Image (cartoon, coloured by chain):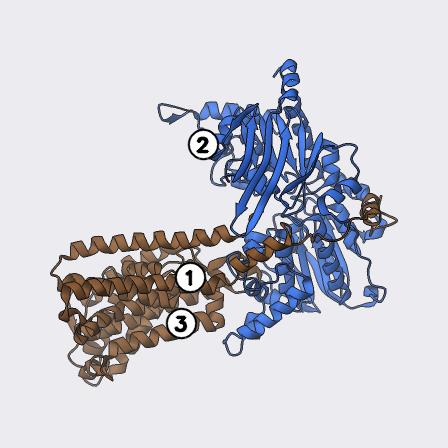
Amino acid sequence: MSSEHPNRRDAARDDAASGSDVPQNVDSQTGAGTMTEQEAAKVASRPFGTSAVARNSGLVVALALLCVVGFITGGERFADMDNVMTILRLAATIGVVSIGMTFVITGGGIDLSVGAVVALSSVWATTVSTQVMASDTHWTLLVLVAILVGAGAGLINGLLVSFGRIVPFIATLAMMASARGLAEIIANRQTQRIKYVPEFLDNVRGNFLGIPRLVWIFIFVAAVGWILLNRTTFGRRTVAVGGNPEAARLAGINVKRHTVWLYTLAGSSAGIGAVMLMSRTTTGSSTHGMMYELDAIAAVVIGGTLLSGGRGTIVGTVFGVVIFSTLSNVFTLNNLSSSAQAVTKGLIIVIAVLLQQRIAERGARRQVST
Amino acid sequence: MQGMQIEDDQNVPLLHMRDIEKVFPGVKALDGVDLDVRAGEVHCLLGQNGAGKSTMIKVLAGAHHHDAGTIEWMGEQVELDSPIQALELGIATMYQELDVVDGLTVAENIYLGHELARGGFSRRSEAAQRTREILHRLGHDEISPHQEVGHLSAAGKQIVSMARALSRDTKLIVMDEPSAVLDSEEVENLFRVTRELVSQGVAVIYISHRLEEIREVGDRITVLKDGQTVATNLDAKTTTTNELINYMTGRAIEYVFPERRADNHFEEAPVVLDVDNISDGERFKDVSFSVRAGEVVGLTGLIGAGRSEILESIYGARPRVSGEVRINDQKISPGSVTAAVRHGMGLCPEERKSQGLILEDAVYRNITLSTFQRTAKLGWLQEGQEREQARKQVTDLDVRPTDIHRTVRTLSGGNQQKVVLARWLLHNCKVLLLDEPSRGVDVGARTEVYRLIRDLADSGVAVVIVSSEVEEVLGLSDNVLVISEGKVVHTGPANQINEHQVLDLVMEGSVA
């Protein structure tokens, strides 16, 4: 029918166009009416800014409550500056690992191997320094080896997930088992003391400007992480890949390569965590970093990063780590068992996630449903 | 059901919804909707996107609870608090996004939620037997009850969805744009099945943007606008298009394909995209064509003919086993979207929501998704610049609402499509591939989308369009390729072929 006039779809519709005398007061685009659309826009605008503040304010309140409990039950002992530093020092190692985890989770993955990688990195580093090159080892070698081993393990994870197409849970579960096993083989199940490179301990331990160096490392890593996630193309890619990998791929983002980078980053941060743990304990051991993966995931999740990917917050993760560290400190000060602590931790995770869902639902209800 | 009963039912409508209101925070989605549906009729629900149709059927399905108004079912007032309640009354809904479980078999899907079981053990053979009966009733004997649903085409999934509705004692089936995923042959089958159901006393609420369909299958029409019933009890056969569009819009819509600009002499322009004998070893074979700057080439054919696969393969999103794709004489390595995008290609995918957009992210970030890395300086995002670029696109393309920080999920289909188009406009692409550009876009916004596509071509972009609507392809394109079963069966100027001829070609190709 349209061979003569390929540009005319339907004559009747043309009539509709010319024959109408209805004033053009309704806009087809706004659908449900201009007024309500504008109201909706007002409510739903800047959902990121406002809800991020709301989420973080929840974390601030939770931390403040914990501190009040700590102060009431522990008094001076809790508020003491040394104790505060203890809390932060404990938070630092797991904190660095959690920053890496935040990236992987924001990118839509998960890394169960970080704890085992901490162990492997520590054992590998101490072996290299104490057994291979004993006397004239420079302390930075220890640091370098630990981070490289972590990055290597992460790289393998990333390759397995991206190119081997193994789901992250399984790929990193396999790494978790084999990294821990390899650590045991290397260390021969013995704890290796760092004694030949005292400069390492001197440089990584101790204080700087009255604050433990470990805490400085955490602050530094968190700051770099924040910038990376919020201000760089790497961060934007991470959010895009986690939010909708197919859309990201079709928009021209190299999703596979980026995924490899994400796991390498998480492995590297586990390597840094190993360095910190070695300095704190003055040892390398295949039992280091037990359950770190779960602590890190818990901190990331209560911080407000979506476990399904697409939204991540470094600030939230830092809060999550500090909250758990404070909790553990308050329990220790009150001579409560670690079992009771574990139960409380579980409760906090559930409550935090329930609250997050509330916030998410409130956000969803704002949206126009047509 | 007996004839007498139908007589009775016409006095008392099967379903009578009165003054239904539904408020979402910030939006009154339904503001006094009236609807009465009789047993044994196809009742069409018309309205633009955002008019409240989807909310309406969600209320009817028990997914949303209405805030005011009453629902009467066979003369008795009922409350629909949950989907189960609606199903138990005999109201089944076939959603636009087919809600089948890919990992289960056809029979398992059909009896999902009301499995045939005795003492906790499922009766698989009986389920299979009944499934076969229902599929036979629908005229789809070729679908096996044991087939995994994930392997079926969209049309097949829709049949499963319909079979599921029939597996219960259903008195009313709500079909939300059932023809959107079907080609014309399958649409005919859908109509046949619908008529059969109606003759058995089942009522159907039929939602569609396509007026021709409504005229063919419908009995009565109710028109919604801005959450209100603006007209009801219209005769589907005799009400004119003019009248219907006036009800729907309050303004007349010019549903016209824009003309090519006079100074667009694409015939003399250089070839930008050259597709040379590509095959993917599976769905299509030896496809060749070229597109000049400023030219629109359309690919048409039945759903499943391999049209989308060809586009994806050109774009590198799908591997190909032989042939070459060149942009300005430069070879594009197969299987790499990144390379294609770097060479200036862009794709608006078929499934906008799952393939095109990051739904939870802001509008501006979706617009700059392909360009933020280019805008960035040494890996540092230039968010200010990005927002500025996005704002310009939002203004140019008239995306509503204009707030670039809004999550893209909250936009209507037409505006979401504009966001994807804006992304590629910003990318300055030389070749734009469009897969079903008007799917889920309402009548008013369609004209705008067509205008945008035409403008793009006139500005020198090489455009390739795939669409199930033959008229759309013919109306928008300069040259057309007809695809049948993965092969090009016809190539030629769009104004030298009509819809009828295209269908003839396609049918002939599918004889084998």
Colour blue maps to chain: B
Q: Disc 1 or 3, which lies upstream in sequence? A: 1
Give the color of chain A as drawn: brown
**Is B99 rendered above or below residue A246?**
above
Q: Nearer the viewer, residue B469 or A92?
A: A92
Confirm whether residue A113 shows in the render: no
Give amino acid for label 3.
Trp
Q: Is circle 2 on the same chain as circle 1?
A: no
- Residue at 71% from the left image edge and 55% from the top image edge: B465
The quadrant of the rendering that contains the N terminus of chain B is: top right
As measured in the structure, the alpha-carbon distance from the residue carrying label 1 to the one carrying label 3 is 13 Å
Secondary structure, mark 3, is helix
Q: Which residue is mark 3?
A: A226
Q: Position of residue A239 (x, y in %)?
A: 47, 63
Task: Check the residue under mark 3 and report the chain it is in.
Answer: A
Q: Which residue is mark 1?
A: A106
Give amino acid for label 1.
Thr
Give the quarter of the image for residue B289.
Answer: bottom right
Secondary structure, mark 1, is helix
Secondary structure, mark 2, is loop
Q: Position of residue A175 (x, y in %)?
A: 32, 59
Q: Position of residue A138 (x, y in %)?
A: 24, 84
Q: Residue furthest right?
A: A4
Q: Nearer the viewer, residue B430 or B415?
A: B415
Q: Which residue is mark 2?
A: B113
